[in-house]
Each structure stands twice: as structure tokens, then as C-alpha cells.
Image (spheres, rainbow, N blue to C red):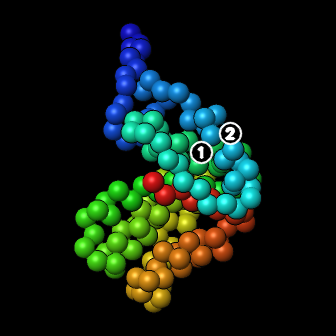
């Protein structure tokens, strides 16, 4: 006997279309393709429970499936526990590595944890920048990164 899942509302974390009642995230951001293509930085500003965490994940999946760019969505929420810059930068780089590892783009998942151990990575002031630089240099396409 097959069980049909009952969709429910989600008020914490990322919504999953198969599990949660939701409006598709990507069509709600019609101008985002132009901003990404124009290499703009942008901020999603919206009320609570409106999809600010779900949108970057959905956009990253869409961008990776379209194939023109690679995309990662990082949510370093644990940064609130960081007591100094070194700890915070370590946490951001670890989050980037975790997102690489679980990325739906195989080329990204192959890069997980490859850049740890570089002597420059001990400098908290440039650690995130060098990590992203190394990842971008290893890729054949441009990388779009969403931080939540």
C-alpha cells in the first residue's frame, strides 16, 4: 500500500516542494536573472515567513540546472555563535565546503574540502576570499553565491 504524503506549512528553514505548502520561489523574483547576468550584488528584503531562506536554495538549483553558471546557497546561521573573526571565517568556509559537498552540480561537489590546508587560509581577514577565489579558478563557468 502506497502512502500519499500530506503537505504541511513550514515556518522554519527551507521549504521543500514535495513536503511543504508553498508558492514557487523562482518566479517571484523576475529581475534576478538580469542582476546575476549583470554581476550585481543584491539583497532579498521581505517580511518574516515569506521565503527569504527558500529563495536562494531554489535559485541555486535553477541556476545549476540551467547550466550557464554554477551556484551555491550558503546559510551560515551558526555565525551568531562566533566570538572572534577567525572562528567566524572558519565557520563561513566550512559552510561553503558543506554546500559544495551536497551541491547538485557534480563539478562543485568534487571541490569540497580541496582548499583546506593552504597556508594563507590561516589568515581570517582573507580566508573566505581566497576560498572563493580558489573555487572559481577551478571551475569552467562563473560561480554565483547566495548567503542567507
Look at 72% across and 66% down and name the residue there: 140
Which quarter of the image is occupied by the N terminus?
Answer: top left
Horizontal placement of 131 versus 37: left or right? left
| Residue 123 on image: x %, y % | 42, 87
Pointer 1: residues within 10 angstroms few (<14), some, or many (20+)? Answer: many
Foreground: 14 or 40? Answer: 40
SS of the residue at dot 1?
Answer: helix
Residue 30 is labelled as 2
| Residue 56 on image: x %, y % | 53, 47
Residue 101 visible, this orientation: no
Horizontal placement of 12 versus 56: left or right? left
Give the number of the mark in front: 2 or 1: 2
| Residue 9 on image: x %, y % | 37, 25
Report the residue that reaches farthest toward the top.
1
Quadrant position of residue 136: bottom right
Which quarter of the image is occupied by the C terminus?
Answer: bottom left
Pointer 2: residues within 10 angstroms few (<14), some, or many (20+)? Answer: few
Above or below residue 111? Residue 69 is above
SS of the residue at dot 2?
Answer: loop
Horizontal placement of 139 versus 61: left or right? right
Look at 48% across and 74% down and name the residue there: 128
Residue 82 visible, this orientation: yes
Look at 70% across and 62% down and name the residue there: 39
Q: CA distance from mark 2 to mark 1?
A: 11 Å
Quadrant position of residue 11: top left
Q: How many marks?
A: 2
Residue 59 is labelled as 1
Report the residue that reaches farthest toward the bottom.
119
Foreground: 134 or 107? Answer: 134
Foreground: 79 or 4? Answer: 79
Amino acid at each position: 500500500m502506497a502512502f500519499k504524503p500530506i503537505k504541511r506549512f513550514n515556518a522554519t528553514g527551507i521549504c521543500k516542494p514535495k513536503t511543504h505548502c508553498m508558492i514557487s520561489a523562482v518566479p517571484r523574483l523576475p529581475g534576478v536573472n538580469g542582476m546575476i547576468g549583470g554581476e550585481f550584488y543584491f539583497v532579498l528584503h521581505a517580511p518574516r515567513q515569506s521565503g527569504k531562506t527558500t529563495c536562494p536554495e531554489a535559485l541555486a538549483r535553477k541556476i545549476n540546472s540551467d547550466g550557464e553558471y554554477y551556484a551555491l546557497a550558503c546559510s551560515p546561521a551558526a555565525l551568531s555563535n562566533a566570538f572572534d573573526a577567525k572562528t567566524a571565517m572558519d565557520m563561513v568556509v566550512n559552510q561553503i565546503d558543506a554546500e559544495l559537498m551536497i551541491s547538485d552540480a557534480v563539478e562543485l561537489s568534487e571541490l569540497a574540502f580541496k582548499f583546506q590546508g593552504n597556508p594563507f587560509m590561516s589568515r581570517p581577514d582573507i580566508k573566505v576570499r581566497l576560498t572563493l577565489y580558489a573555487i572559481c579558478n577551478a571551475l569552467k563557468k562563473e560561480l554565483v553565491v547566495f548567503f542567507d
